[in-house]
Amino acid sequence: MLKLYYAPATCALASHIALAEAGADYTTEKLDFKINQQNSPEYLEINPKGRVPSLVTDRGVLTETPAMLAYIAQTHPEAKLAPLDDAFAFAQVQSINSYLCSTVHVAHAHKMRGKRWATEETSFADMKRKVPETMGACFALIEHRMLKGPWVMGEQYTVCDPYLYTIATWLEGDGVEMAKLPKVADHFKRMAERPAVKKVLAEQAA
């Protein structure tokens, strides 16, 4: 059985949704960031990065959302969460998820994680002011060049979809108007209507 460590309102939502979509046999454990549980000795034994998500498998622990999403898709091929029989198409899935991880998520993190990149308080404020611009630019690229519709990869729902949905939940707080991104907004609505998404959101809210 798989075990997912997560915290609400984090990128762990993407892997949680993917597990539900795959029909995987899994359990979850919620970490409380308010008491810094992600940096507790017990959790650092699982993930020395002190971040979520972490996915415990029978072969060890996986971290980093793109790797976890690929693993879920590959170990549950019957769910058809990635084009596993097409090397180029699967690489495209990986490319999109890598962009969401290494560029879009990082742009978002500048709003409240400035200490990762600077020491001066004035730098933190400047980074925060930049977030609406950088996140807006990222999602303009997604809107016009990456989101094929109705799903990210086109007609086939893939592990790209819960990841994009997860990051799109941060847009309002980042000062980006989803109304100006009609394809992203349509995708967000489609995702919110999926039974697996409703199930996971209810679990995380409990």
Image (tube, rainbow, N blue to C red):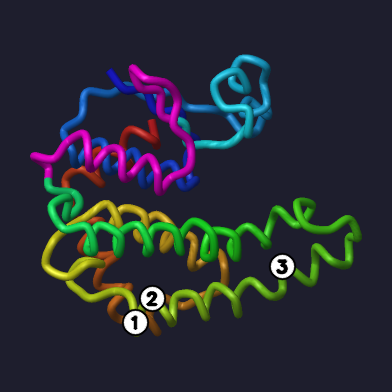
Q: Is residue 122 magenta?
A: no
Mark 2 and mark 1 in contact? Answer it, CB < 8 Å: yes
Q: Is residue 73 magenta?
A: yes
Q: Quadrant of residue 199?
A: top left
Q: Is residue 10 above or below residue 174?
A: above
Mark in the foreground, 1 or 3: 1
SS for tag 2?
helix
SS for tag 3?
helix
Q: Which residue is mark 2?
A: 142
Mark linked to residue 128: 3
Q: Depth check: 193 or 134 in front?
A: 134
Q: Which residue is mark 1?
A: 145
What type is the residue that disc 2 sits on?
Ile
Residue at the spot x=60%, y=80% of the render?
A: 133
Q: Depth check: 68 or 88 in front?
A: 88
The range drawn in magenta is 55-79
* In this rendering, position of residue 162 left or right of residue 40: left
Sequence-wise first label, 1 or 3: 3
Q: Is residue 173 above or below residue 130?
A: above
Residue 151 x, y percent position in the rendering = 20, 66
Q: CA distance from mark 2 to mark 1?
A: 6 Å
